[in-house]
Amino acid sequence: MKRIAVLTSGGDAPGMNAAVRAVVRSGTAAGLEVLGVRDGFAGLIGGQLMRLGPREVGGIIERGGTFLGTSRCEDLKTLAGQDAAHAQLRAAAIDGLVVIGGNGSQKGSWALAQRGVQLVGVASTIDNDVFGAEPSIGATTALDTALEAIDRLRVTASAHRRAFVVEVMGRDSGYLALMAGIAGGAEAIVLPEEPTDAEQLAGEIRRSYARGKSHAIVVVAEGARYNADGCARYFREHAARLGFELRITRLGHIQRGGAPCAFDRLIATRLGAAASDCLRRGEVGILLGSMQGAVAATPLAAVTGSTKTFDTQLYRLARTLAE
Ligand code: F6P
């Protein structure tokens, strides 16, 4: 292996830059030539490549987002798109590819690996829903961002004795909602993985006040039926009967921006360096994720064929602690 490339794909996550930096610097230190691909798989299909040396990745470890750019690439889901990506790699004499991204991106990785591309995936998404990573790059920073907002909202909620719904990201995954809910001391947590009854939710809020609390904070995941919109609709329609109003805050993409925390910079650095090492050793068709403080490799076939299990015990604990 002489020449490798690295790209970031899907939703950006704080720490992606640190991972690219580590791929480039450890790759060049080992004698590899490293290219960066602009704008994820879309840029690969379009042949948008640039040479990256140690100096080109200076001053980025502390920056959120991804200096390479990223995209959600519909074309890569088609055989024609995969052919085009493969052809660009061959034309540029690229022997190995590192793909830094979440679930959707690693599906693309697996499709290319099956076509013979020597590829290593690196788990990076704020959703923390990639099988083989606990946590993925970016999830811890996003959690801290959500938590800071929840702490602030609790202050104003208490001052007015109000109930607030805070929506955090997570289309299919309740990780951020569950963790932010527990760490933020929420009175209720609503997740895509657990069915929630709106009347029961209203009951929990009412009981919080009855127990002497001065506020109620409900953390909801974007992908839950009773997310910000779902709750707003239900509680507006039934406001007179339920006896209280809800204030709604959707944190949205604020959670994706911001400088990566120390933990995300460190796991990104270890995973990026390990990715270029794996390519050199010919250990390909795998996803690298941080697991219990170490770098773990999982076959991409297993990653795309598995769903991460939801921690029901932690969910039950959250309910107990809301008392
Ligand atoms: O990257 C993951 C994620 O932030 C999800 O939590 C969210 O549902 C989605 O991306 C939003 O995607 P987009 O930025 O493309 O709107």
Image (cartoon, grey):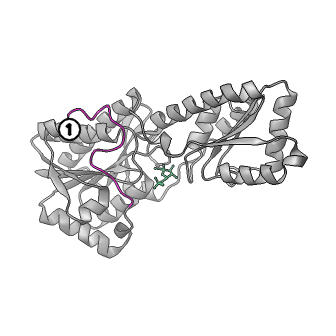
Which residue is found at the position 75% from the left and 42% from the top? Answer: 246
Is ligand 1 closer than 8 angstroms to the Cβ of mark 1? Answer: no
Q: In x, y percent, where is residue 128?
A: 49, 44
Residue 155 quadrant: top right
Note whether residue 40 is visible: yes
Number of marks in the rendered image:
1
Q: In x, y percent, where is residue 261?
A: 41, 29
* Chief secondary structure of the magenta portion: loop
Which residue is found at the position 43% from the left and 46% from the top? Answer: 125
Q: In x, y percent, where is residue 177?
A: 61, 41
Q: Is residue 60 above or below residue 169?
A: above
List the residue tagged with mark 1: 57
Q: Is residue 287 above or below residue 53?
A: below
Q: Amino acid at mark 1?
A: Val
Which residue is found at the position 27% from the left and 44% from the top? Answer: 275
Tell me where the magenta segment starts and ends, as one range.
58-72
Return the residue nearer the eye: 293 or 74: 74
Return the residue nearer the eye: 197 or 153: 153
Left or right of 94 on screen, residue 222: right
Q: Quadrant of the C terminus?
A: top right
Return the residue nearer the eye: 241 or 173: 241
Note whether residue 1 is visible: no
Q: In x, y percent, where is residue 163?
A: 75, 36
Residue 54 quadrant: top left
